[in-house]
Image: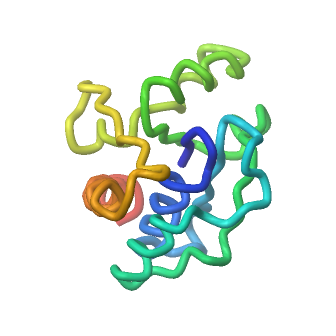
Amino acid sequence: MVCLGNICRSPLAEALLRSKVSEKKVIVDSAGLDGWHVGEPPCESSRKVAKKNGLNIDHLRARKFQTEDFDRFDKIYIMDHLNFDLIQEQARSKKDMEKVDFIMNELFPGENLDVPDSYQKGSGAADLVYKMLDQATDKIAEKYIR
C-alpha cells in the first residue's frame, strides 16, 4: 500500500487488509514515496478514524518506498496519480510496473480513480478515505486471499 507520506491513506489500507487476511499467508505493508515523515506515526485523523472503526494503527511508522519493494511484493497498490508517476520513476523495468495498480481499480476496474489525500483535511475526509479503502481491501481479500 503506497501513498505519498505513509501517514494517512496507506497505513489505513495496510491495517484494513491485515485485519482481513492471514499474516501466515500474506505479507501486508505500506510505504510512502517521499521521506518527509519517515519514522512518524499515522496522522491524527487517520488514527481517529481507525480507532472509531475498531482498528489500532498507533504502532505503525512511516517508511519510504524502496526499489527493493518491487522484489519483495507481488502487488503494489497506489492511492493516486501522483503516486503512479513517482513510483514509475523508481521502476527498473516493465515487470516492476506490472505489479503496480491503483487500489480503487479493485472496485472500478481500469478507471484509475484516486483515493483523496485526507492529510490535514479533517474527520470527514478521513471517514471517506476509510470507507473507500475498506471496500477496496474487501475486494483484495476476496480476490487474492480467500
Q: Residue at 47% across / 52% down in the picture? A: 120
Quadrant location of residue 129? bottom left
How many marks are shown on the rendered structure?
Answer: 0
Q: For the C terminus, which image quadrant?
A: bottom left
20 up-or-down from 121: above or below: below
Residue 115: % across, % down: 35, 41
Q: Look at the image and tell me whether residue 139 can be seen.
A: no
Observer able to see residue 52: yes
Rendered image quadrant of residue 90: top right
- 135 on left or right of 44: left
Establish if 118 lies above or below 4: below
Which residue occupies the foreground of this view, 38 or 84?
A: 38
99 relative to 32, above or below: above
Instruction: State the residue in front, 39 or 71.
Output: 39
Q: How is the image coloured?
A: rainbow
What is the quadrant of residue 51 in the picture? bottom left
The residue drawn where x is 60% and y is 63% is: 42
Q: Residue at x 22, y 44 (%)?
A: 107
- Where is residue 43? Give x, y as percent: 56, 62
Residue depicted at 73% across the width and 17% down the height: 92
Of all residues, the one furthest to the bottom in this rendering is 54
144 or 16: nearer the viewer: 16
* Residue 22 drawn at (x, y percent): 50, 75
- The picture places residue 41, in percent across and down from the top left corner, at 67, 66
